[in-house]
Amino acid sequence: MALDWDRIGTGDSEALLRPRDIYAGLASRPWPYLRHEQGEVLDKWFERRDDHDVVIKQNTGGGKTAVGLLIAQSTLNEGIGKAVYLTPDNYLVKQVREEAAKLNIATTDDPYDPAFTTAQAVLVTNYQKLLNGMSAFGVVGDGKEPIDLGIVVVDDAHAALARTEDQFRLRVPASHEAYGKLLEWFAHDLRHQSANAWSALEDKDATALAPIPFWAWADKHEEVLKTLRPHREEQAFKFVWPLLAEVLHLCTATATSAAIEIRPSCPPIDRIPSFVRARRRVYLTATLADDSALVTDFGADATLVAKPVTPGSAADLGERMILALVALNPDLDEEAVRVLARQFADGDQDGDGIAETEPVNVVVLVPSDRAAANWARHTPHIWRVGDLEAGVKKLQTSTVGLVVLVNKYDGVNLPADACRLLILDGVPRPLDGVERREAVALADSTVRLAREVQRIEQGMGRGVRDGEDYCAVLLLGAKLATAIHDARHLALFSPATQAQLKLSRDIASQIRGEGLDAVRQALRACLGRVPQWRERSRRALAEVRYAEHGTVRGEAVALREAFDLAATGRAPAAAERVQKAVNDLGGSDRALRGWLREQKAAYLHLTDPVAAQQALAGALNDNPFVLRPVNGGAPVQLKAAAVQSRAAAEFLATKYLDGRGLRLGVQALFEEVVWGAEERSDDAELAWQQLGLHLGFASTRPEKLYGTGPDNLWALSAARQAVIELKTGCTTDTIAKKDMDQLGGSVRWLNDHNPEVEALAVMVHPSRVCDDKATAVPGMRVVTPAMFEKLQRAVTAYAAALASSPDRWADEQVVREQLAHHKLTGDQLFTTYAEPMGTS
């Protein structure tokens, strides 16, 4: 007689609830046991499972996917309600479902599947499926009954943030009829804020960036509604309009030559009631130091976010040797590094042609196609998002060699042999208008640093997926080198990464100043599994513990609470809440203080426009890059330093703690100037302004500060100032009429506002030949690429000399000698490192 197994061992027994028990009860387990760290976090979550928001932190590759799936199944077994597992993209949806199949957990990717709607299977889908104005889960006001959810698991929660913000951003393309109408509505306000930015918009300049003042936006929001509402069913609008329509007056609007971008300060997440009302929300994250965005973007409970669930030990991270090549030797050539990468991909050989290491997969992460082009001669494998699924499978199953991934710093798993040498060649830059404005206004704020470190740590985590994995990591460029050297950056990395960076610094100290052969030997120790390296690597992590409390910045909580207050018609209370955050900041981070005070003014304007303008004037005192009040602000006359060398020494002493930081900082400035890249114009302008300070000149950005005047203004002496226009993004053979006119206008601006000084006109441009239709500014000088390279060599040598022994850069006399030696004084610099106008 055949046994009926459906009647055996079931009876009245309850479904297994503890995630660990669910795994133990599997007939066929993918692994004999859960990892110790997985079991720890599952047990801790189970004790806190009734908390509305739970953040689970594990090192990259710590098995978070299995943890999230078991938690979802536990919730189903408990009868709490339907379960949704969210991933960043469809590529990862497929990966998660494959993992679920190994765990015998039923899943679907269809929100209408009866197995999901009856809570028999976990819905695995991407963030966009839930968070959009046409959501199958229901949106406030769409007439649908919202889907009742027991749990939402948000995988790779920090990667979700950018996508969430994008889902709540309305973009009106320049090709759309509404774009021109909106520009008409706000033309006067935009001109008043920045005549230069308005001219750039009219010229369709790719670098144009013009924030629409909050008072104009709020006062005309009915006109905006009438302009945009008729298009609400169009493809470009329909997924966002239902989310923003009710809070349009609270949004920030920014005009660029490509689009007008409309975005709220916090996503109105309450428009998606299924997510807001879900009984349980679990956020799976890497061990990043700052979790504030979970509050601002998802409306998570700040108190609960600050109590993350973590394993007892942070030693579950795979081995990584992390080397920043510029920090090892500033003279290392990046092209030679690319050759080195190719050699490891092909099988690193010694001088006799004998392989020292087997061929390995080398993966390079680059932020853009421009950066990828530098690798094109070394590999045909340059992959973008659409290539990932097939490409990553190849890496996981074979030795492909050298592969370049474009703008993919998260959501790619490259375990074991899929990636043994990982190279980060730059980090993604701000792309949309709001981010670009933030990058200017908060350039040196901890808020910006935290985002930058998050991207770097995500990128560095691609190559190790569990405690037994290993990978060498090379960082190219001074910006990345600074991130793992500067104390402010370092504090924002996870504890385990900090421990690995400390170990890597011990290696770096022994090979500093050496050539690529020394780097090659260090990499062989990691890739060749040298026992001493393995032992020290394990020991470095052995005692590392996760931070007991998560970091949730006070101003992030305030911005979320203030937005929610304003969205429910309580604007004065919203302004008070932001002011409290300003008070709590005290005198620290003045840039952030000013930024917050601008937000306070925006809320005040809704009930008291006069008080709003007064508040904005105060914000300007803290941060000169916030909006200018209606009455404007007269440009402040730039005063030259009494003694250039003293000003330089004081600036360098304040900014740099050691000589290596000084050399990296200077090199990073020059990396920000990319010829022929219009999208990098803001970076170049900031770099030039900072360069002036490094050399002891009073240095400002009048166009950004006042909406008129030059890109940069350097006070070379009490009697002479350099009016500098940067056109590093130009690719023309001559200086165009509009660019020459702009320089002439900037000279007149200085003459009007400070007639006591002589203006030296300076153009940073790939050509020193004037277009036939243009008239050169008398006495002007041009910094061409050749002159720029000459200047770079001089400033780099200046920094190296100052960094050669402790505190030399703080010694006024030493600085004076070096400035004079390298012809970087106010009377010599533009004579030596710029040329007069040429002829065609």
Image: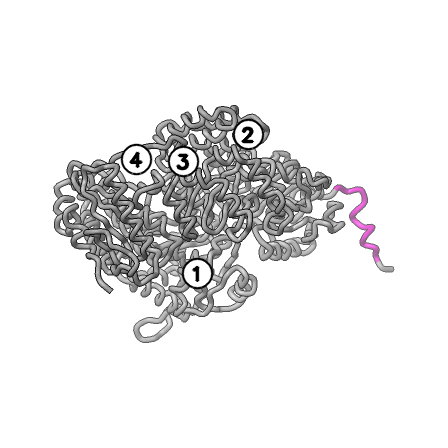
User: Please, what is the three-letter code of the amino acid marked with disc 1?
Assistant: Asp
Q: Nearer the viewer, residue 81 or 67?
A: 81
Magenta segment, which residues?
Answer: 3-14
In the rendered image, residue 242, in percent from the top left (x then y), is placed at 63, 42
Q: State the CA–CA distance, disc 3 to disc 2.
A: 20 Å
Q: Is residue 44 visible?
A: no
| Vertical relation: 693 (above or below) 371 | above
User: Please, what is the three-letter code of the amino acid marked with disc 3?
Assistant: Leu
Tell me the residue that label 4 is attached to. 635
Q: State the CA–CA distance, disc 4 to disc 2.
A: 33 Å
Between marks 3 and 4 in the image, the one whose residue lies nearer the viewer: 4
Q: Report the disc number at residue 209.
A: none
User: Please, what is the three-letter code of the amino acid marked with disc 2?
Assistant: Ala
Q: Is residue 714 visible?
A: yes
Residue extending farthest right: 1
User: Within 10 angstroms of label 1, few (less than 14), some, or many (20 or more) residues?
Assistant: few
Image quadrant where one finds the N terminus: bottom right
